Amino acid sequence: MKSGSTFLLSARRCEIAELEQLARTCELVAVIARLIHALQRERGSSNVFLGSRGARFQAQREQQVDACVAMERDVRAALERLQTDPGEVRNGARLFGRIALVLYGLDDLPVLRQDIATHSVTAGDATAVFVKLISGLLGVVFEAADSATDPEISRALVAMFNFMQGKEFAGQERAFGARVFAAGFIDRAGQQQWRHLIESQRSCLETFDAFCGRVLRRAQEAMREPEVQEQIERLRRVGGTVGGDLDPELSDCWYHACTSRIDAMKGLEDMATNYLRHLCERRIAQAQGELRDQQTLLQSLASGGQAATGGPARYGPHLERSVLMLLQEQSRRLQTMGEELDAARATLQERKVVERAKGLLMAQHRMTEDEAYRALRETAMNQKRRLVEVANAVLSISGVLPASR
Amino acid sequence: MKSGSTFLLSARRCEIAELEQLARTCELVAVIARLIHALQRERGSSNVFLGSRGARFQAQREQQVDACVAMERDVRAALERLQTDPGEVRNGARLFGRIALVLYGLDDLPVLRQDIATHSVTAGDATAVFVKLISGLLGVVFEAADSATDPEISRALVAMFNFMQGKEFAGQERAFGARVFAAGFIDRAGQQQWRHLIESQRSCLETFDAFCGRVLRRAQEAMREPEVQEQIERLRRVGGTVGGDLDPELSDCWYHACTSRIDAMKGLEDMATNYLRHLCERRIAQAQGELRDQQTLLQSLASGGQAATGGPARYGPHLERSVLMLLQEQSRRLQTMGEELDAARATLQERKVVERAKGLLMAQHRMTEDEAYRALRETAMNQKRRLVEVANAVLSISGVLPASR
């Protein structure tokens, strides 16, 4: 027969099992971060290779493909280790849906690479496939952050997700700027797109800053390279603000400054994944220690410690005061944890709203995902409103506007 | 090697496992509802028995004790069936903590009953023990509602929790009014307490109304007894609003009107638990059907259906359009579900805020739970503000005020 003590210990064991599952998810996030970085580089070198009609970056690209294949192997191995038995994974339905999408995307990479090697695809189309795959991988990290049950780890995952997303925007800006400088001209629409990439980065990195904690914030400050940042700002002004005709010579200069910045970001990302691992290990050890203490306490009560201290109180659970206090402390702690968790998750809410508005536009107005996002973004730009505000407005009038079929 | 299709099917299986676990939790809620009802009646008859110094309700009380013992057996059996293996239960840490507290409380009941039989306890003290135990049982229902992963079931559980809580306030009001009428007098503090019991009921039943759905709302309307309600309102005015000296003859009249209302509530509660069971069964059957459809689709693709329809698209997952649409539909549905779930859970938020403010007052100002609640309630009454507003104010200045040690 299950007693109060059975459930008291079960509660603690559940907490440990959730933390262990979370640790495996964090491992997955770490290998995904490395795969994304490798894919970002493959995307860059494929772009140059296709743009130069095969004259440049042939060897670099092939090397980078090998690196990606190795990283992909690591990700698949981590997925192999992931529990997929139903009931074992919190948020499994959503997490696994995202993973399925990523795996189908990875299955397609060999075909794309073949097409790039034989110049059967444009630079723009190839980039779009990489962007989509990376976005899918970020989606897995997003679900991992959204399913975390420990506030400290949840905050670290929210920071991590925003940093990775910010780094991806930085990569997209690098490619965009290089293309624009090389073309020697930028129009108003291009300038707007550029501003949006800058704005999206800023917003992600601000959220990272709010959630990363002191250790990572200090590391970030230590890694800052003011000259690089200054050069990027100067070139952003030349291209994005002044506009019109551009000096094609600036393309390489831009590319190198951005690369130097992104490499520094990669360094910080590695630190963040290590920090995440350390956090999981510490929390598991702590919860296990608490479980042992509880077991000892309950055993000593069962073996007669109770009688020695004067017997049970008359009303209220007939338990040692120590167990009652333990129960109250535990319930208060879980409650506070739940609230801190809600606070961390609230920042993920905005992304959900934007995703949903995009989905609505796609379904009701037969737009592609890219068109839907562009429509939201441009409305936000024109009305000088935040993206999430426009997305909310779209959702709130969804029942009012007729669907265009 | 796990493929995209493995994860696609795992996602659906996770959904089913979560629904099945939820169905078991709903079964637990149903038996808890019956135990609470029996305990409410035992509390009432114990009160009369002790108040009349054993002259009245001796047989009724003994009968009711037997009924409670039988219901308790059902609850313990349902707990026995509950999965307690770590990792099997969503929200296990919090749910099991609440269950532990309830089991320790149930273990104490025989001692209390003995004391009631021998008149070694006052009516007030006995009532306090029952109130605390019932509040613990409601806590289990609360965690069940907070851990539901399906928006429809979550709404039904939120409705159920609020109804049960409202019914408990109705029971407390019945006891309070009977005592006050019997005493023949009510002071201002008593009137305030009475108004609070009425206000708490109203707020719970409003939330029930917002979440119960059409079927239960109609049933509620059909069950309404206008004469009983009118009589209760009239007596509330006599006792709560006019006040001062009261006619002790009204005590029985009040008790019977309230009992008639509470019995009608019990009927609706039974309907609600049946509805909950039906909802779980329907959602599980639906998810299983969808899983079978997906399996069929993926199998037909694997066995060459793909080649027959023209082979894979070049970029984007090399899959049938049907699987891609299925994936997108599934991800959109899960996203919408997540948002609906958040909306339903938001109503549970207020209770959490009040609980936390209570905990804070208890810890920082060495109050008992009852004193803390009374302090919050009286501030709310005096300032004509909602309880949750006062609780929020308490939390927001918690860092400002020094703790009284």
Image (cartoon, coloured by chain):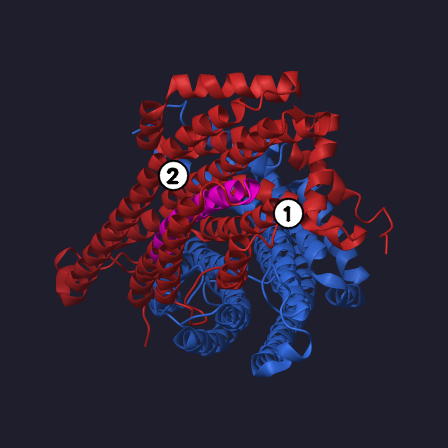
Chain colours: A blue, B red
Secondary structure beneath dot 1 equals: helix
Residue depicted at 57% across the width and 46% down the height: B127
Q: Residue at x 71, y 36 (%)?
A: B390
> Alpha-carbon neighbours of circle 1 within 10 Å: few (<14), some, or many (≥20)?
some
Determine the image quadrant of residue A145.
bottom right
Q: Position of residue A301 (x, y in %)?
A: 60, 78
Q: Quadrant of the C terminus of chain A?
A: top left
From this view, report whether residue A256 is shown above or below residue B55: below
Q: Are marks 1 and 2 on the same chain?
A: no
Find the magenta span and give its range. Answer: B24-53
Q: How far apart, in angstroms, are the residues tagged by discs 1 and 2? A: 43 Å
Residue B355 got which mark? 1
Q: Position of residue B56 (x, y in %)?
A: 47, 40
Name which residue type carries label 2: Met
Q: What label does residue A2 carry, if any? A: none
Q: Is residue B27 located in the magenta-colored stretch of the structure?
A: yes
A257 and B367: which is toward the camera: B367
Task: Check residue A362 in the rendering and tell me which mark sits there, or answer none.
Answer: 2
Three-letter amino acid code at disc 1?
Glu
Q: Is residue A240 visible?
A: yes
* Residue B200 shows in the view: no
